Amino acid sequence: MKKTLLAAALATGFGFAVGAAHAETSVTLYGIVDGGIGYQQLKGTYTTTDPATGLPVDVDYNGKRTGMINGINSANRWGLKGTEDLGNGLQAVFVLESGFDLGTGVSGQSLGNSNRMFGRQATVGLQSDAWGRLDLGRQTNIASKYFAGIASPFGVDFGQAAAGATFNSAASLRYDNMVMYQTPSYSGFQFGIGYSFNANGPQGFRQSGGDDPNTHAWTTGLRYDNGPIGVAATYDQFESPDAFADGTPNPDGGVKVKSWNVGASYDFQVVKLHAGFGQTRNGWFQGITFADLDATGALMANDGMRVNSYTVGLSAPVGAGQVMASWGMADPRGTVGDDEKQNIYSLGYTYPLSKRTNVYAVGSYAKNVAFQDDLKSTLVGVGVRHQF
């Protein structure tokens, strides 16, 4: 009730008309606030492009940071979600969710030089217990929803310990302009599929006889999650645009970048085991930011590139809390140069103080970050997370 009243008050403050409350309609304010103290280091040599010459250049880097960390256990966010009963089991639904940096208050999920107001999710749709859910707008892809939490005990969370640091299409990847359908869960089985008319940014016009400036993307998957068993299989694909937004031809235009993943878990009660395998071809979907280095970029085409990804992990109850451990490797094949295997070793622990608040600790070490020989990343931190 408090959340509903506060959401109504916020809506009034933003200048929207708020009518009389109806029993069949609800709006909820929710979010996560996560902060702590930690240490991060990125050390070694990586190859980047010299902006003056356009040629590759090696950069020596040794950066350390001790102090506040935030959004580690879960990314910081706040949002509004609502439903309206349309009758016959049908509901209208919406989600507006914004990410932010707890240390500075800066909005997350930037686009160009501006920030998206609801960069984590902005969708409207319809749902029914009988036929499932249809969402339209910016939203997370199927691999992040279905695969990450089954293949890794860290799921999409805990920074470089997350499944997405090894399986790039499961790194909380979001597509703009997407239509997504998901079935209800039938005895643990669920299927989802989505199509994006332009995966990153506003949908551009294709002039008559001109090149298509839009990045079209597909995401689909099937999962079974019932009792002790979890299994998931997902597939993502995007096609690099024929031209950039300014109309300049794209030299990598028309390249289809593909990623598939399979994962499984089994809960023995005393310990839960996780494992996953996947492959990405002809490019990269989304990388993880190691310290201050956005090492791999997002939605990049690289014809002939191939990366095999592997992970194993476990989680187990320890007292009232839970310990988690995982290893992940991304092994580049068929690329140019002496790319190295990226390995990440992670250990974490969470302890609930209440249903909404927990404390956590995490340590993660990555070697050959972004396939760069001898580039290492270390993260150690403790924090508190509150959900509302």
Image: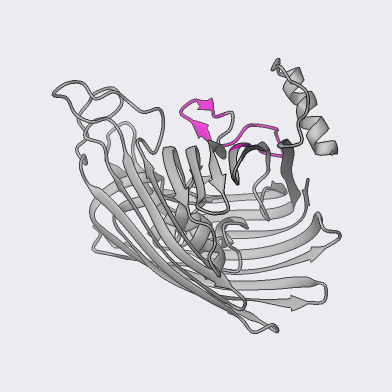
Q: Is residue 261 above or below residue 75?
A: below
Frontmost residue, 167 versus 27 = 27
Please indicate whether residue 288 sits to the left or right of residue 335 in the image: right
The N terminus: image quadrant: top right
The C terminus: image quadrant: top right
Q: Does the image show residue 166? A: yes
Please indicate whether residue 323 sits to the left or right of residue 170 in the image: right
Q: Residue at x 21, y 41 (%)?
A: 252
Q: Residue at x 59, y 44 (%)?
A: 88
Q: Which residues are magenta?
A: 93-116
Q: Is residue 384 above or below residue 102?
A: below
Q: Residue at x 64, y 84 (%)?
A: 268
Give the x, y percent position of residue 230: 54, 73
| Residue at far left of view | 209
Q: Does the image show residue 170? A: no
The quarter holding residue 241 reads top left
Colouring scheme, one of rainbow, by chain, secondary structure, one colour: one colour
| Residue at far front of view | 88
Give the x, y percent position of residue 140: 50, 47
Give the x, y percent position of residue 217: 34, 45
Q: Residue at x 24, y 49 (%)?
A: 256
The quarter holding residue 240 reads top left
- Marker count (numbered): 0
Q: Is residue 44 above or below residue 77?
A: below
Give the x, y percent position of residue 258: 30, 55
Please indicate whether residue 21 sits to the left or right of residue 363 in the image: right
Is residue 150 highlighted in magenta?
no
The quarter holding residue 6 reads top right
Is residue 101 highlighted in magenta?
yes
Q: Is residue 36 above or below residue 85?
A: below
